Image (cartoon, rainbow, N blue to C red):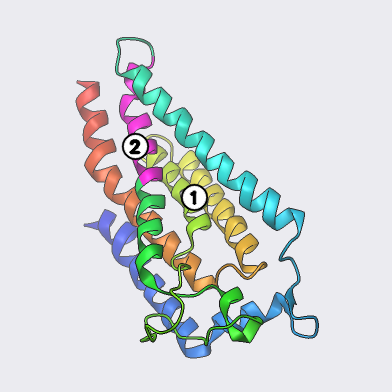
């Protein structure tokens, strides 16, 4: 029970409080305003090398490379060799990245929520709607919620669960690095008008619960059976 309290109930409660705070204070708009030049009508870092190439393009490539390496490792470990003990480690990494980014991508397709750069507030065309507000079907369909790019970074929360049963220090280092990478990915998108902060908060929570679920369903039972 303590595990679920610390890893599911408490994170979910904190997340709900933060989302409610953002809604009441209109903090999404306040933060987005910091990145937009209202006089010149453009995002300060909209086309910068740091946000477009380094954080977005290279960051995405980093996650893809990790996914491919884990997939190759899983295939190799299916055969009797020195990688066999890591079979479920590779499977867990592969599935967590795929499900985290895949679920977020699917939600983006159906959520009908705009990016900041699409809004008339920021030289776009569409009016602003709060998260989960009713949006007219006559308006253009939004494809910006949850944050897709940050889901790649936050999918690395898997490393917390990967190490938690073996080395708590490494688990917390993995947790800190995943949060840091996720926030860097998120910041790159906030600063160019691609997402509001809450878009990426939702992605972080989705990735956390994917990593948690697959830890309980795949990793822990799998490692236990392999050790027998």
Q: Which residues are magenta?
A: 83-98
* Residue that numbered label 1 is attached to: 152
Picture quarter with the C terminus? top left
Picture quarter with the N terminus? bottom left
Residue 179: x percent and y percent?
A: 53, 55
Q: Nearer the viewer, residue 142 or 176?
A: 142
Measured Cα–Cα span from mark 1 to mark 2: 15 Å
Q: Secondary structure at mark 2?
A: helix
Between discs 1 and 2, the one toward the N terminus: 2
In this picture, is 6 found above or below 94? below
Residue at (37, 71) in percent of width and height: 111
To which quarter of the image does residue 8 belong? bottom left
Residue at (56, 48) in percent of width and height: 177
15 relative position to 223: left or right = right
Q: Nearer the viewer, mark 1 or mark 2?
A: 1
Q: Residue 89 lies in magenta, yes or no?
A: yes
In this picture, is 120 found above or below 13? below
Q: Secondary structure at mark 1?
A: helix
In this picture, is 78 found above or below 115? above
116 relative position to 73: left or right = right
Prevalent SS, magenta region: helix
**Number of the label disc, if any, that sits on residue 92:** 2
To which quarter of the image does residue 193 belong? bottom right
Q: Nearer the viewer, residue 165 or 127?
A: 127
**Number of the label disc, if any, that sits on residue 206:** none
Q: Nearer the viewer, residue 79 or 209?
A: 79
Residue 222: x percent and y percent?
A: 24, 31
């Amino acid at each position: 029970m303590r595990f679920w309290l610390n890893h599911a109930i408490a994170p979910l409660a904190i997340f709900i409080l933060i989302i409610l705070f953002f809604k009441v204070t209109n903090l999404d708009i306040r933060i987005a305003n910091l990145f937009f030049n209202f006089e010149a009508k453009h995002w300060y870092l909209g086309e910068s090398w740091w946000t477009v190439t380094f954080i977005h393009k290279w960051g995405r490539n980093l996650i893809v490379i990790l996914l491919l390496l884990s997939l190759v490792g899983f295939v190799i470990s299916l055969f009797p060799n020195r990688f066999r003990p890591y079979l479920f480690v590779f499977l867990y990494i592969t599935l967590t990245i795929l499900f985290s980014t895949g679920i977020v991508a699917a939600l983006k397709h159906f959520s009908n929520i705009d990016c900041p750069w699409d809004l008339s507030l920021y030289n776009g065309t569409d009016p602003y709607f709060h998260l989960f507000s009713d949006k007219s079907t006559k308006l253009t369909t939004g494809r910006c919620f949850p944050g897709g790019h940050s889901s790649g970074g936050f999918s690395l929360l898997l490393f917390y669960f990967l190490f938690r049963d073996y080395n708590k220090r490494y688990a917390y280092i993995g947790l800190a690095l995943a949060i840091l990478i996720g926030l860097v990915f998120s910041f790159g998108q906030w600063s160019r008008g691609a997402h509001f902060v809450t878009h990426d908060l939702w992605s972080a929570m989705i990735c956390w619960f994917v990593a948690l679920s697959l830890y309980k369903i795949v990793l822990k039972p799998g490692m236990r059976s392999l050790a027998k």
